[in-house]
Amino acid sequence: MLDVDIDWNQWSNQLRPHFSEAIVQRGWLYYQQHAVMELSMEGTSVIKARVSGASAYRVRIALDDFSRSSCSCPYAYGSSCKHMAAVLFEVSDQLGFEPKELFAASGKTGGNRRPEGQSFLKEIPRPSAKDTSSVWHAYFEKQFGSAKVYNASSVEELYTHALDKLRKVADGWQPMLKAIYEIHVVLFLMELCDSLVEDLSGNNYYYQNISYYYSEIAKSTMEQLAHAMRYVDPKEAWLEHPQYVTELAAHLGGSVLEDKQDSKMNWTGAYRLLWWNLLHEKSLISTEVRRLRELASDKGRSIHARKAAVMALVHFDIMAGHDETAMERITAEVRRIDPGDWFGYLQTFAQLEQWHRLVNWLKWLQPAVGKTANECTNTYFHLWNEAAKHVDIVEEQKQAMVALLPGSYRHYSRSLLDKKEYQTWADLILLLDLTPFHIESSDWKLVEKENIRVLLPIYHHAAEQFIMEKNRDSYKRAVRLLKRLGTVYKKLKQSPRFESYIQQLSKQYTRYRAFQEELRKGKLIT
């Protein structure tokens, strides 16, 4: 038990300006979880403790000057953190004061002034199944809207905690309504994470590993939305909860109307997922399309915002089955076509077994794929392969592979080998100026076994290319290939021809002393 001689009321009043509501709430959670350990005094003016969080953090509370307090966590920028708040709640308890009253009166916190007498820990009424979604969002905002973070990992921590807490509010609700509520929770958290990036964009420490943490959050939000959709039947949702569905459409539409160019959340994916799987009502679609058209034509909007509107309009074209209209709109209004923006649709066509539709989009995307420096060829040709299992597109697929060389080399090579077209495969290797060192050993061994003769020109070409590079390392590679070439001629029972070739080669490059030395080392000449 601590023994501290201090005017508690005066000191607690001095503490309040150092703590935001969000930090106090998180500290309260740690206190309730009994995370504060090894509480002790250092002299008469410093309280020490250890708080168990992601790691064990050391906290020092300076009673005579709180600004000298510290915590070993990475979040303790400025004056306070949740671990300090947890320690202060524990100190209050041990000194016989009511912990909830520690921050009962508010002053200026985190730059925001709150009404006098408001408690940071005041119980906010939980939303009910009868409330509007705007009431839900007001609750979300009250709980976490003022949250502060100091690095990327703390954003993920906040996201996980908020998701868990806000989802529990709907425990016991009718499953479909609970799912709609959870969709709103996820959309709020996506907006919150975006705002945290904007608020701390100048903090270099914050940006350490930001891509990793935010990619994890973005992935989780899409998984949460997909999970919620399992409990929602679009027709039943519209019949039973038209108000909530309408409010969701309006809220989601606002996410496209905002300029989210720097967002690290997958707003496009969320928008498409919800409109495709839930918001099917014609009146909702009509309202949204009208709004998108106004945005797309508004020259006062940013280029990014107008492009987002165009992309959304394309989504509704595709939903309606108007693929030609969608392609024309993209070609006319999108400066750079990124295949990755459309693969999700193509994968959906494959799942729905709409093979001819899939092939039409693959053909249309071909020029864009050719400009992506091989970044998306794997996905692109995987979709071709899926379609080829169900419809006869052999020639069309081959034309696509040839057109996208050299980026499509691995796919075209695999196709030729699968079809036993070994001579065409060898011609491809020569066309692309590849050496045996570039080719997967399993492929090379297969051709050696099935049609070894087609390898001869590849060996000859590669060996002479290395010789022409005129350096010792290249000469060594050339000799390695020549020795392997000799083995091929031997298997073909044409060793005299190989020996004649080596003599001619040695004579042709007689002035290349280093090359002559490597030939002797390789025992190709004496």
Image (cartoon, grey):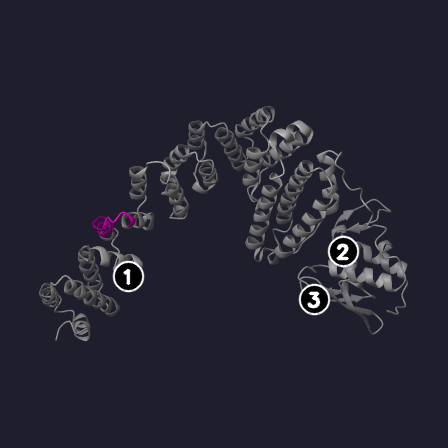
Q: Is residue 79 left or right of residue 192?
A: right
Q: Which residue is mark 3?
A: 56
Q: For this rendering, which residue is in front, 421 or 379?
A: 421
Q: For this rendering, which residue is in front, 146 or 252?
A: 252
Query: Label 2: few (<14), some or many (≥20) within 10 Å?
Result: some
Could you tell me which secondary element the residue under label 1 belongs to? Answer: helix
Q: Which residue is mark 1?
A: 437
Residue 196 on image: x %, y %: 64, 49
Task: Tell me which numbered mark, 1 or 3, is placed earlier along the sequence.
Answer: 3
Q: Residue at x 54, y 27 (%)?
A: 293
Residue 371 on image: x %, y %: 37, 43
Q: Which residue is mark 2?
A: 29
Residue numbers of the magenta segment: 418-428
Q: CA distance from mark 1 to mark 2?
A: 60 Å
Q: Amino acid at mark 3?
A: Ala
Could you tell me which secondary element the residue under label 2 belongs to? Answer: helix
| Main secondary structure of the magenta stretch | helix
Q: Amino acid at mark 2?
A: Leu
Q: Is residue 420 among the parts visible in the rendering?
A: yes
Q: Amino acid at mark 1?
A: Phe
